[in-house]
Amino acid sequence: ECKMTKDELGELIDKSNAYYSICSLIDNNRGRKVIIRPSGVQTFLANRLAWATAQLLGLFFDGNDSTHTGTALHIAADHFYQNKIQGKVATFKECMLVSARAIRYMCKANERYSIYCEAKRLFVQYFEHALLQNPLYSEMPCGIELDEWLEVKGTLDRIEVDEYGEHIVVDIKTSASNVYGTKVEEPTELVELKSQKTLFEKSIKEQFKPLNSEKRLKKTSDERKIEIEKEIQKLENELELQLSLFNEKIKPLEDEIAHQQHLNDCIAAKAKYGFQLAIYAMLYQIETGVEIHKARIELLVKTKEPKLRVFEFELDDLKVKVDAILLHIKEVLEYWNNGVPASVLFGFNPESFRGSELKEFLDF
């Protein structure tokens, strides 16, 4: 595979006509073997120029803190899972030590400590989850030739086996943003119950005010203070009881909303990452003969307090489409190899993945 940095590319192109200049360089690379990466298929669908500059021209952007952190986390997780597959238990410290060694070769000296600290911060959240998993393979390379000049290959993060013996393809992601599906609106019944609860709580608390005021007065006798204490205790008991009754009605409705929201979030995760995992499932089946129907995304959200979110979804509908998508990519590449210009086949979308980097570079 050819490789080219952003700076190297900048020296080769006509910056006054960058798009067509880059397309011309892509056209000069005809005849080489092309590798389709599962992680790049959705890039192809969303931004063909971004895909072509990476896969046909070999352009790569220098790894930033985010990509280095993700790689460091994957290395720590892989060390844990490789040991677990062999019946051993790697400690948190051992996993981070392996990751730290990799960071030394991956990052500049002045970046290493911050990358290590961020990877460690995320792995703290992930480690407890990892202890509960049942891995069969970790960081497993797989691939298939579609033609003598075209190959689909990559490295899947992990294969798990669930309690029913079914294989699951798993991918670990790190992101600064969470994944949210369509928001589930609260039903009228829940809205009314919450309103009633608030009004009742406010009404009871209003009754506390005159009692507490009277209790603080110097002229209030000790006997009256005892009576006030009993009245306050009675109100507190009534408040606790009624709030408990409200919560008994509210909680099942909120649980159902949370469940439905999670399902919607899983749909969003499937839309974002599904094709990549469907291709890995296909490659795994070709490699092992075992069919995979389910995928899991383990998303570490890099918020102030890192959060691990797990999304599972079915793959069968996407696997049906994978053959058509790969055939489509193959047909586009055949047109390109047969002389159709890259400027006709590989359009640019500045709003998609890697679009912002290319937009800045190409001055779109």
Image (cartoon, rainbow, N blue to C red):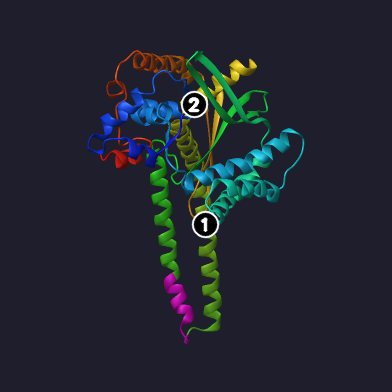
Q: What residue do we see at 42% from left, 56% from top?
A: 200
Q: Earlier in the sequence, mark 2 or mark 1?
A: 2
Please report the residue visible at 59 percent of the width from the left and 51 percent of the height from the top: 120
In the image, taking residue 165 as reference, residue 24 lies left or right, namely left
Quarter of the image containing the C terminus? top left
Instruction: Tell me the amino acid under the disc marked 2.
Output: Pro
The total of numbered circles placed on residues is: 2
267 lies above or below 208: above
Mark 1 neighbour class, 10 Å CA radius: few under 14, some 14 to 19, many 20 or more? few
Is there any visible trace of residue 270 in the rendered image?
Answer: no
| Snapshot quadrant of residue 27 | top left
Q: Is residue 321 above or below residue 196?
A: above
Question: Bounds of the magenta span?
Answer: 209-219
Left or right of residue 108, residue 133 in this image: right
Image x and y of residue 355, in percent:
34, 37
Is 151 above or below relative to 8? Answer: above
Q: CA distance from mark 2 to mark 1?
A: 33 Å
The residue under label 2 is 38
The residue pinned by badge 1 equals: 110
- Closer to viewer: mark 2 or mark 1: 1
Between 226 and 161, the one lying in front of the other is: 161
Kindly state the secondary structure of the residue where label 1 is placed. Answer: loop
**87 to the left or right of 291:** right
Hey, what amino acid is under mark 1? Asn
The answer to if 215 sits in the magenta stretch is yes
